Image (cartoon, helix red, strand yellow):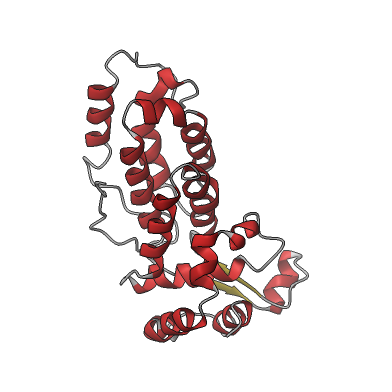
Amino acid sequence: MKILKSTRRSVSPFGTRPVEKDAFDDLLSVIQDRCPDLKPQESATPVLFQDFYLVPALMRRVAEAPAKDAPELKVLCDYLLKHALEITAAGLFDEMFSAMKFIFNRKTEIFMIDHHDKTHCEKMGWTDEYRDMVLFSDERDILVGGYFEPATREKPGHFSEFFREWSETENLDRALHFLDFSAKLSRSTFDFYLLGSHAAISRITRNKEIIRSLFQKCQPLVKKAKSPTWEKDTRAALGI
């Protein structure tokens, strides 16, 4: 499986840096080669499979979108799932999966926490004593629960490989995203908390040795995180 790799690191909480110029241009060329009978549409958002040529541009917009400002991400996930049979028949499943991993890697290439204390929570009308908000966590969660898992139900090996690679990443920021996501799985209020019972996930997240080693490996970044509560709460959620 060809994996598109990011060579840049996001530095702004307001959005990722522009994607490499040809990251999705190459994908469009592959689609045009495999599906020559499709007709380009004038709309910006794909709906029918006939609109497949619009997907690379949509992926680019999603990849470049600021945190909490990617309404098209769910549109993209839903489109790829809705037309999964046509995409597979065209021999493009691996390319789509790889492109979505590229987007996932963009969203998880930096780990930042916005910690809100009680005073700020009261100003916002929140009942929390405090609240930790992880940059791009919403997009990360949608990608995992809204695309990677449902898209691979007929190809379980793909999801197992994706989750294993994430847990074994050498990128410490992405590893902290893994711990943050894993902790969320224990909360019934989390949209995708049922994923916690997925064999590929539970095999890793319930392994205390793996979780402890990840925390140990990530300590240099954890110490720099601007939150006095995130590590304690995440460890508690993961049972360590």
Q: Is residue 193 left or right of residue 100?
A: right
- Residue 232 screen position, x and y as percent: 59, 85
Instruction: Tell me the residue at 71%/71% (across/down).
Output: 121
Which of these two is toward me, 103 or 117?
103
- Residue 140 screen position, x and y as percent: 49, 56
Instruction: Tell me the residue at 22%/23% (across/down).
Output: 33
Judge whether residue 113 can be spotted in this image: no
Instruction: Tell me the residue at 60%/67% (across/down).
Output: 184
67 in relation to 99, above or below: below
Judge whether residue 2 can be spotted in this image: yes
Q: Which quadrant would residue 99 be assigned to in this image?
A: top left
Which of these two is toward me, 138 or 122?
138
223 in relation to 38, above or below: below
Q: Is residue 208 left or right of residue 193?
A: left
Labels in figure, total: 0
- Residue 101 screen position, x and y as percent: 36, 50
Q: Is residue 81 left or right of residue 42?
A: right
* Quadrant in the picture for the C terminus: bottom right
- Residue 130 screen position, x and y as percent: 68, 76
